[in-house]
Image (spheres, coloured by chain):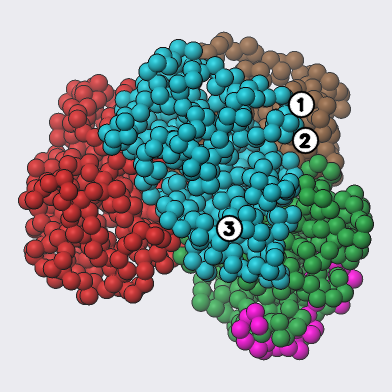
Chain colours: A brown, B green, C cyan, D red
Amino acid sequence: MKSADRRVKIAILGASGYTGAELLRLLASHPNAEIVALTADRQAGKPIDTVFPHLFGRGLPDLVTIDSVDWDGVEFVFCCLPHGTTQEVIAKLPRHLRICDLSADFRLADVATYAKWYGHAHRAPELQDEAVYAITELVRPALGNARLVANPGCYPTSAQLPLIPLVRRGQIDPDDIIIDAKSGVTGAGREAKQGSLFSEVAEGISAYGVANHRHAPEIEQGLSAAAGRPVVVNFTPHLMPMNRGILSTIYVRLANGASVADLRRTLEAAYAGEEFVRVLPEGRIPTTHHVRGSNLCLIGLVADRMPGRAILVSVIDNLVKGAAGQAVQNMNAMLGLPESTGLGQQPMFP
Amino acid sequence: MKSADRRVKIAILGASGYTGAELLRLLASHPNAEIVALTADRQAGKPIDTVFPHLFGRGLPDLVTIDSVDWDGVEFVFCCLPHGTTQEVIAKLPRHLRICDLSADFRLADVATYAKWYGHAHRAPELQDEAVYAITELVRPALGNARLVANPGCYPTSAQLPLIPLVRRGQIDPDDIIIDAKSGVTGAGREAKQGSLFSEVAEGISAYGVANHRHAPEIEQGLSAAAGRPVVVNFTPHLMPMNRGILSTIYVRLANGASVADLRRTLEAAYAGEEFVRVLPEGRIPTTHHVRGSNLCLIGLVADRMPGRAILVSVIDNLVKGAAGQAVQNMNAMLGLPESTGLGQQPMFP
Amino acid sequence: MKSADRRVKIAILGASGYTGAELLRLLASHPNAEIVALTADRQAGKPIDTVFPHLFGRGLPDLVTIDSVDWDGVEFVFCCLPHGTTQEVIAKLPRHLRICDLSADFRLADVATYAKWYGHAHRAPELQDEAVYAITELVRPALGNARLVANPGCYPTSAQLPLIPLVRRGQIDPDDIIIDAKSGVTGAGREAKQGSLFSEVAEGISAYGVANHRHAPEIEQGLSAAAGRPVVVNFTPHLMPMNRGILSTIYVRLANGASVADLRRTLEAAYAGEEFVRVLPEGRIPTTHHVRGSNLCLIGLVADRMPGRAILVSVIDNLVKGAAGQAVQNMNAMLGLPESTGLGQQPMFP
Amino acid sequence: MKSADRRVKIAILGASGYTGAELLRLLASHPNAEIVALTADRQAGKPIDTVFPHLFGRGLPDLVTIDSVDWDGVEFVFCCLPHGTTQEVIAKLPRHLRICDLSADFRLADVATYAKWYGHAHRAPELQDEAVYAITELVRPALGNARLVANPGCYPTSAQLPLIPLVRRGQIDPDDIIIDAKSGVTGAGREAKQGSLFSEVAEGISAYGVANHRHAPEIEQGLSAAAGRPVVVNFTPHLMPMNRGILSTIYVRLANGASVADLRRTLEAAYAGEEFVRVLPEGRIPTTHHVRGSNLCLIGLVADRMPGRAILVSVIDNLVKGAAGQAVQNMNAMLGLPESTGLGQQPMFP
């Protein structure tokens, strides 16, 4: 059944975090989505509006433990649990469920790389083999039959969308890519941490995880596949005082005689007809203000003053195209629904 | 024709300000709205995305002058022009147009009051007679036949929604009402003013227009009508560092033996069944975070420590229920469309 | 010895919070202050710059436990510990120490009131008798001989400075005082709490502790003393997105035939010659931007539109005049040093 | 006379902007500074506290026109005028004045470069020859006899302090330097511009002047001199929602067999004993929060994951070390005063 009035029965695991709340915001306008279960083990028994008062009056189910979900009444699962926990939970889920996992657990195909960056051997390697890493626009044909999709990280989405078409075409040097990324604070989650306090974040900016962030191997995995050989990149994230948004400024070296105009043509061709990924006209640089709340990724491209180099700027809302929005987009693709269903939210500016 | 697929041909006058942009955000999901003209006299000839880059790719008409609009192709007008100018423009518009005016020009029914607060005699007093001042929930029956609606100010919306039912019922003393309101910066508009600069606003709060703000007579007009006699209130607005939102903390004295529970019952009855105005359960106080981007007005109510007094807290998004959202709601009511059409945007938190 | 080059040996207990850090900022320019001990029981053994990197290179002592301090080498103590703990710690300190306590433990003279608001019987009532509650300007003569000073809360400082002279003179009705206060987030401390996260606070405002905040009895204690009889006030605090600052908008009713001009004269007389408390000229309203980083309290006064009423606006930096700055000012007064020593920091705008 | 109680008579030209106000903040604690004139041609006749209310009660002279200043009573001038205007004003000043110019007018030694980037031929090229471009730490010996000092731009200060010692030593490749800089909004000045409005800046980040910013040639001038040959760099500034601060993330390639440890040693040696420039210990990355309000420049250094590369992070307060603070430091050096006089302001955190 793919009719317009089909209702997919959905469970959200880990619904008490920002990503869970964002899924609920987006799915409110999804005509085919029916929320049947919301889990949050430590908050089980509470109405969702006790943890998210803005959901007051939505008629959503109360929070329950994962163990108490009746899986027979569920078709699709969004999993918003912490990494590590996720692989154990998903391994136990019935096989009839189709799953979009928003954690990092199934993003790294290589178990050795996973173990190195996450500090423990993967506990469900067979699922890791099964999982499809899905920046929707780049793997669309594989999604129709996927049971388990690994929804990409926010930074990797913002970096790979502009870079992968260029690396595939050999128009930039894969060994000279610098990704300077700036993120809003929701990316750090809703856990009470000193570093995420208003007073520690407001009125300043800090680099973190310099040369050491877990999204680096995820980006390198995608670029290595595109290049056909191992690639190491610079990825330097910064935490800045805004709720939402990632702006990645990406410094690249032209290769194989390519010009900046060639790069532009490649990107325009790669994303022609895409609803959510847009290459801005020459002379325009995107800002995060212009995607807030929407599933858009905007890409700008400028020639560098340094000869033979170019600058790419990409922006997304980290909670939408960088998390919940892309997850809904992936669900739509998995279920054969029109890909933009439920994703009509326009950028909210200001 | 009121069928579900009816398309209303809409012009937005003054589309280069925040209110115009917000109308375009909301109307993007309105199935019956067709934008046929956008005006901005000083920007005429430009694509709308040169003044609002986030509207890139929406397929909207270019900006034109008001004089160049072909009114035969327009049915409904949202007027987002500055006060003073507005009355002159609207006076010249063809009579077949139905109009929702978002300026202050038709909000004050009494021309002497208008002249006192705006510094000049009203130039279209006959239109002022015709105009319906419309907090939708409070004047709904009058809207079906209205040609010209005065959309309320943002502060007055946040103050009158909780107060009017209580004053009507005589449960609070109309001569002892203090409205301490805190607003985001978009309320000051998009004009380049020193006082609206980031560096002047961020990291601080200031009271302004103390005992002297133009929204005071608008609030008093509504409360006087509810009380059946002239009422003077304290209204003290504050400018604070957020883009959107108004929180009004309202201090009232109980009257005629009413208890706080009585006040709660009155408000719950007044807004029972309303989609956009909600009285929170006892013990809950609303915050602006929980209405951002939505057309909601949330109201909380608490007994004061001072005997015989109560505290009301109301929150809205100043650009939505305080401006563009209520304008769309009014349009829907004027045209006989379901009142919530195009207003399904959920609160965006964070 | 009160000579200009006297060096007072100072210990700061609880130096890992914002108030401790602020004391270190201010005391860096205090020519008579020598920091000899910094305590933080859970961080003992660490250099202070591991908890506050901005203190790198200051040559400050490492953090130690309270028990390991050599009190013989200490003359003056700033106590920045949590309430409850504080009274137990101070009760055990040697009697030769003079102490300025920044917690709430010795602010409420009445032990029954303390027990009611803090949920347990006071554990050092004899010290509570001894303690001097010290808004410096209001109790200056008592400070020279004080051994233990209770440094006032931030909100109570901002509220009492404008109100007490007026209540003392009987020029306002003590039974009709409404204090609507707006605070920056540092007031909530450095503890990792979900409610203090950037993403929960930014882009919004919320009322909290409505009719129920622990600073209400502290304010009422001062106003009752000024009135000569028990006074109950409305005190409604709001949390807003800025690091520092409190703006209190205070609504009062004139009494005993007093005019707004009379109120102004009273306030001007009360604070004539004061360096840190200033009554602004008629027509000026202070903002928190204009005191940030300084020990100033600015007060503005406006006639209300409601007959017989007035509006007071006072602003302070909650970490300076509302905490560490007033503490240094109190220390200076206790030790016979010029009261403004070390407090020359100018407002930082922007 | 260089005695400790010497009072230098100072005029600030263009005192109504943020840089002027910041000079007044810093000089308030400078024992040798006497402000004798403040100019602002369009605001002449007004007390300074009408344009900067936070300067209320400071006893400063009223604003006057430049033409009305009695130069005989002035020894030192801080010039905070717009570029273009500055060169004309300074050319007419009496020769007995010593001048620190905070505009861009005398920063580029090459008149052709100036003309290219500023769009007009320089109108005082003989003064440009005379001017000393002064990052204090790098040109200290030349300042004692300088009459006219060009105070560096904020971005160039943050970029050159970490880079110049490394380029001089040949330890990094001067042809592969990428400077990704993030700035607070005060850098854009106090002029009312739409792009600086709170609502345009808050809750987002944007790159601007990409491959085209006027600070690029200033940085290149310094690095070219250090390299002994022309150097072109990537400099990409970003505007983000904070009042103060610049964080520059600088990506470099090691050269001539140098290791990251070598770079660290070079920087530590270059700034050993400096009060305001500090190289953080290995493993620490500075943030702008930790320099706010102070004259500090903090530098961190990390090995890149990409072989043969390193990442430098430098932070300053753009209004202090990036403008007014360095100007005072330069004045001190010019006049033979201890260089840190008046610059004892500690970082304000939070």
Q: Position of residue B202 (x, y in %)?
A: 50, 52
Q: Nearer the viewer, mark 3 or mark 2?
A: 3
For the point 79% across and 85% down, the residue is: B129
Q: Position of residue C34 (x, y in %)?
A: 34, 28
Residue C99 shows in the view: yes
Span shown in magenta:
B116-145
Q: Which residue is mark 1?
A: A43
- Respond whether the residues carrying marks 1 and 2 are from the same subunit: yes
Q: CB of mark 3 within 8 Å of CB of mark 2?
A: no
Q: Which residue is mark 3?
A: C313
For the point 70% across and 65% down, the residue is: C256
- Respond whether the residues carrying marks 1 and 3 are from the same subunit: no
Secondary structure beneath label 1: helix
Q: CB of mark 1 within 8 Å of CB of mark 2?
A: yes
Q: Chain of mark 1?
A: A
Residue C198 shows in the view: no
Q: Chain of mark 3?
A: C
Q: Is residue A130 above or below residue A239?
A: above
Q: Which residue is mark 2?
A: A50
Q: Which amino acid type is shown beneath numbered disc 1?
A: Gln
Q: Position of residue A78 (x, y in %)?
A: 72, 30
Q: Which amino acid type is shown beneath numbered disc 3?
A: Val
